[in-house]
Amino acid sequence: MTRNAPIATRNEVARAVRSALVTNGYADLRTAHIADASSKSEGSLYYYYETKDEQLAVFLRRAPTWFDERIEEIDASDPDERLREICDLLIASDEDDPLYGLQIVLMQLTSHASYNPPQLREALTEYKRHLHGIISEQLRAGIGQKIYRNDIDPEETATFILMVLDGTIGSGTALEMQGFETDAQTQLEAYLDDLLI
Amino acid sequence: MTRNAPIATRNEVARAVRSALVTNGYADLRTAHIADASSKSEGSLYYYYETKDEQLAVFLRRAPTWFDERIEEIDASDPDERLREICDLLIASDEDDPLYGLQIVLMQLTSHASYNPPQLREALTEYKRHLHGIISEQLRAGIGQKIYRNDIDPEETATFILMVLDGTIGSGTALEMQGFETDAQTQLEAYLDDLLI
């Protein structure tokens, strides 16, 4: 049974899991790493979250807000400009960016989804849908403002863009194939240019 | 020190790692799983490959040939038709396909690349370059045969296609978001249509 943790505890656990994941990678993650990254002892983490998977679920439910906070900082009001900045932000390949590493560990969890309990799959699915919603929102706004062609399907197009970003995070960021990253970004720019009226 | 294993042993280790990875996932992979999936004892695996990472490297160096064998079976000679069949094959999302699960575990290793020793990163980079080469070869053939437009950059375009496939393997296959998979494939078809003269 999971006890209802106070919000401050949930947020701290989410941040500790994030930090421990980015440092150690999912395959080597131990609850001791999570405890080390928080002010809590392993025992008190287990008081609220009895398994590592429950701790991971707290992290996954919190993950969308870390991107939302950054997206809110984008100044551009033009949907096309916003979308391009969002794409850059979601690749998060700059090692000095606090988001660096976060997308990589989310990819680790995504690729292990079928081995993990349903609660993790559901939280990951929610997270992907959330990003998809952010992208499709810009596309719909752009179509509405006659910036993007009105024959594009915003839902399908958002999926395609998200798949390009996810693939680029894998080979480009995680595997550090910089040539792939640059080429994928150039082609994504061209793809977005093609959506314009 | 790694002793030079006979080819038959290398192949058996590669197959055993593949099977153990697909069954258990990278995060839970133990050398005992690999030994269980082979005719070798854990002790005799260690005689040739002293660490799990060395066993994984053998698997990664063998992985391209499993795709090559399947690509060789494609009958189509038209580069565009071949490319579309290759894209389907690389997503490998049909659970009855022997390739099912292989791309997912390769994605698990890709997303852990920066936590792993250089030999694994190098083998993964080679594997990605190999797939990229297969895709760009079809694009170049298609441009040569005036099937594809001659203003496309076959290298960049191959990267973009590979990133779409990789992203789709993550969300579509590993996370089983079938809607994403269908939409990404529809949009990839449209993207390929756009390359045609």
Image: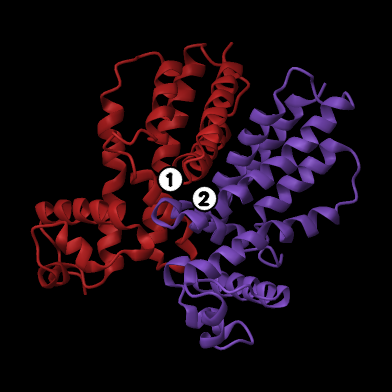
Chain colours: A red, B purple
Distance between mark 1 and mark 2 Cα atoms: 8 Å
Q: Are marks 1 and 2 in contact (CB under 8 Å)?
A: yes
| Secondary structure type for disc 1 | helix
Residue B26: image x %, image y %?
47, 66
B63 relative to B8, above or below: above
What residue is drawn where x is 73% and y is 32%? Answer: B192
Locate the N terminus of chain A and report the quarter of the image it occupies: bottom left
A48 relative to B146, above or below: below
Please indicate, yes or no, whether residue A85 appears anywhere in the rendered image.
yes
What residue is drawn where x is 73% and y is 56%? Answer: B67
Residue type, numbered disc 1: Lys
| Secondary structure type for disc 2 | helix
Residue A76: image x %, image y %?
34, 15
Q: What residue is pinned by disc 1?
A: A128
What residue is drawn where x is 58% and y is 46%? Answer: B166
Query: Dot 2: within a 10 Å radius of its alpha carbon, few (fewer than 14), some, or many (20 or more) residues?
Result: many
- Chain for mark 1? A
Residue B93: image x %, image y %?
65, 57
Residue type, numbered disc 2: Ser
Q: What residue is pinned by disc 2?
A: B171
* Nearer-the-camera pick, B45 or A14: B45
